[in-house]
Image (tube, rainbow, N blue to C red):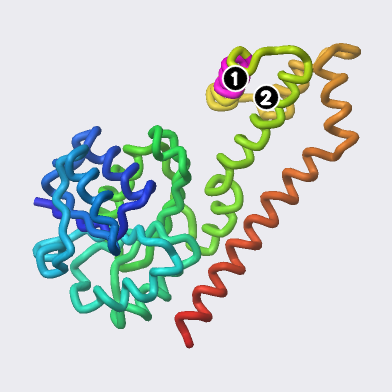
Amino acid sequence: MEKLAVIGAGSMAEALIAGIVKNKLMDGRQIWVTNKTDHEKLTSLQKQYDVQTTYDLDELFQDANLIILAMKPKDAAEAIVHIKKYLTEEMLIISVLAGVSMNSIEMLAGQSLAIVRAMPNTSAAVGKSATALAINQKVSAEQMKLVAKMFATVGVTAIVEEEQLDAVTGLSGSGPAYIYYLAEAMEKSAIDIGLEKKVAKELIVQTLLGAAEMLSKSTKEPEQLRKEVTSPGGTTEAGLKVLETYRVQHAFIDCIKEATAQSKRLGDHIRAGMEV
């Protein structure tokens, strides 16, 4: 029987636990969770998902074959060094630590390990994450299949090379914030043109859901879908001309490129700190 040990109990860890339990991939009693000091959070997870919680590392790692590293990246080095004596080559290490490479994890653990790096986003909380997965050569096909099932409980998955995870971070990892930023602007404009906030939010949410569904179901490119909505001399064209004047599309492109660059910089900073 599988035993999953989760190190860290933040929102991403909870989303994964919720997805795994809800979809009956594992029973809550097969999942053991710990964190640094937040006793209340562990109690809450235990009550809500029937998971096991402990601060006893011997108990946590006994018979565990799946380990999720979900602490804050800034705490990763200290945490991995603290648990390294419990890690073995037979375990599968699943890391959701942004910027912490597989090589860095192995260096801190002082041994060769089977590692999957995952880059989900906050939409995992509602089962709609876009998660990229990268693996090293020590991960078996059976292990990879299990990890794919785990992250499928919180959304869709894609397999990428580890070098591509910074780009994934800039695009979909940070992506929900870009959409929320757009929704903020739409809400503000709705109030300015005389709509009530509640009504505006309902319309905005449905508009975003509908557009996302069209992108998902249609075989047409986004450009073609946009053109089909844009009648010459119409309202959509008038609005889009303003966006073009402000170079909004270019701003989004630069936004994603800069987020990707920042992910690389943070990764370099973390690696440099580990080498000191």
Mark with earlier residue (2, 1) = 2
Q: Which mark is residue 271?
A: none
Picture mark count: 2
The magenta stretch is 200-209
* Residue type at tag 2: Glu
The foreground one among 276 and 41 is: 41
Q: Quadrant of residue 91?
A: bottom left
Q: State whether residue 218 appears in this view.
A: no
Q: State whether residue 92 appears in this view.
A: yes
Whether the magenta-drawn stretch holds residue 150 is answered as no
Residue beneath label 1, please?
A: 201
Residue for point 25% across, 60% down: 67
Residue for point 58% across, 16% down: 198
User: Which element is circle 1 on?
Assistant: helix
Give residue 64's position: percent from left, percent from top: 15, 61
**In the figure, is residue 193 to the left or right of 101?**
right
Q: Residues within 10 Å of mark 2 (few under 14, many from 20)?
A: many
Residue for point 15% across, 59% down: 54
Residue beneath label 2, please?
A: 187
User: Which element is circle 2 on?
Assistant: helix
* Cβ atoms at labels 2 and 1 below 8 Å apart: yes
Give residue 111's position: percent from left, percent from top: 29, 80
Give residue 109's position: percent from left, percent from top: 31, 78
